[in-house]
Amino acid sequence: MNKTVLVTGGTGFLAVHTILRLLRQGYKVKTTMRSLTRGESIIQALKEGGLTEFDNLSFYEANLSADKGWNEAMRNCDYVLHIASPFPAEQPKDENELIIPARDGSLRVLKAARNAGVKRVVLTSSFAAIGYSKDPQNHIFTEEDWTDERAPIMPYIKSKTIAEKAAWLFIENEGRDMELTVINPVGIFGPVLGEISSASLDTVIKGIISGTITESPAHTFGVVDVRDAAALHIKAMLHPKAKGQRFLTTSDGAMSFYDVAQFIKQHRPALATNVADMKPTEKEHYVQMSNQKAVTTLDWHPRSREEAILASIDSLFNR
Ligand code: NAP
C-alpha cells in the first residue's frame, strides 16, 4: 500500500477512529490539527486502539479559518477525508462562529486538494443537512432530502447545510477532475479512544447518567457507531459508485433520551443511580430514515444502535 490520505482534524472523535482504521489497513496518513501540541493526544488514543507503529503517520498544523498550512498538508495526497468542522456542545450566540469555519474551511480544503491533484475528497456532512426542514411525520428521510438553510434552524445545523451545499457547488464549477463524496452521519456514538470524546457523547450519555437531562423531548435521533462511520468514509473514498453521491449514515431505527435512560437502567444499573425518570417519547414522533443506499451501494453493515450506545457508556465509565 503506498496511497496517502489526509484526514483533517485528527484531534476529533470520528477522525481518530478513521486514522486508526487507515493505518491498520496500511495507508500513509497525514492529519491536520489547530496546534501541533495536540499530537500527543492522538498518539495516546491510537495506542489505546492497539497501534504500536506510527511511522506512517504525520502531523500538520492548519486551521479552517486560515489558508496557512493547507497546501503543505495536501502535498502528495491521493485522497482527503475532510472531517474537521466546529461541533460545540452549546450553540454560540453568533451563528457565524460556526458557519464561517465550516463553509470557508471546506472550500479551503477543496481548493487546496484540487490544486494538489487529489483524486477524491470525502466530506463529513451530517444528517443536519438532510433532516431539518421536512415534517418528519409520515416521512422517511433519504439522501434526496435537504435542510433549507433559510429556515429558522440552530447554528450548527445551518453550518453543516451551508458547508455541504458550498462543497457541491465548488465541485460543479471549479472542481476540474476531482471527485467529491459526502457522508451524512446521524448522532455518532461508540467507544472513546484515549481522551478524545465529542459533543454527542458529552451531551447525551454524560447528560443522562449525571441526571442533568430530566426530560425526553419529542425529537428522537439516529445512532451510528463511530467505527462504522469511519469504515464508511474509507469505503466512500474508494468505491467507484460513491463518486458524486451523499450517504445517510445510520444504524437501523432511532432513539429518544427516554430509550437511552431505560437502556442504562437495564444494562448498566450501577451507573443509573442519578438517571431521571422520564416520560417516553410518543412512537409517532420517531424520526424515520433509510440507510439502504450505503448498505446496498457500499456493502456497509452497521452495528446496532444499542451496541454503539453501550460501547460509549463502557468506554466513558467502565474503563
Ligand atoms: P469533534 O470530536 O468535536 O471533532 C471536530 C473536529 O473539528 C476537531 O478535530 C476540531 O479540532 C476540529 N475543528 C473545529 N473547528 C476547527 C477549526 N476552526 N479549524 C480546524 N479544526 C477545527 O466531533 P466529531 O464527532 O468527531 O465530528 C467530526 C465531524 O462529524 C464533524 O464534521 C461533525 O460536524 C460531523 N458529525 C458529527 C456527529 C456526531 O454526532 N458526533 C454527527 C454528524 C456529523 P479541535 O480539537 O482543535 O477543536
Image: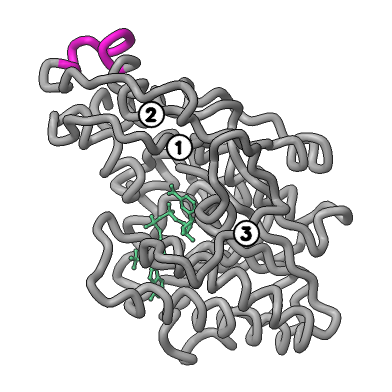
- Three-letter residue code for mark 1: Phe
- Three-letter residue code for mark 2: Ser
Question: Is residue 302 positioned above or below 247 on the image?
Answer: above
The residue where tag 3 is placed is: 146
Q: Mainly helix, strand or loop, the magenta region?
A: helix
**Is residue 19 in sight in this rendering?**
no
- Magenta run includes residue 149: no
Check contact, mark 2 vs mark 1: CB within 8 A.
Answer: yes
Alpha carbons under labels 2 and 3: distance apart = 23 Å
Ligand 1's image quarter is: bottom left
The residue where tag 1 is placed is: 221
Nearest to N terminus: mark 2 or mark 3 = 3
Q: In what quadrant of the picture does the N terminus appear?
A: bottom right
Q: What is the crowding at mark 2: few (fewer than 14 residues within 10 Å), some, or many (at least 20)?
A: many
The residue where tag 2 is placed is: 256
Report x, y in % for residue 11: 39, 60
Q: What is the crowding at mark 1: few (fewer than 14 residues within 10 Å), some, or many (at least 20)?
A: some
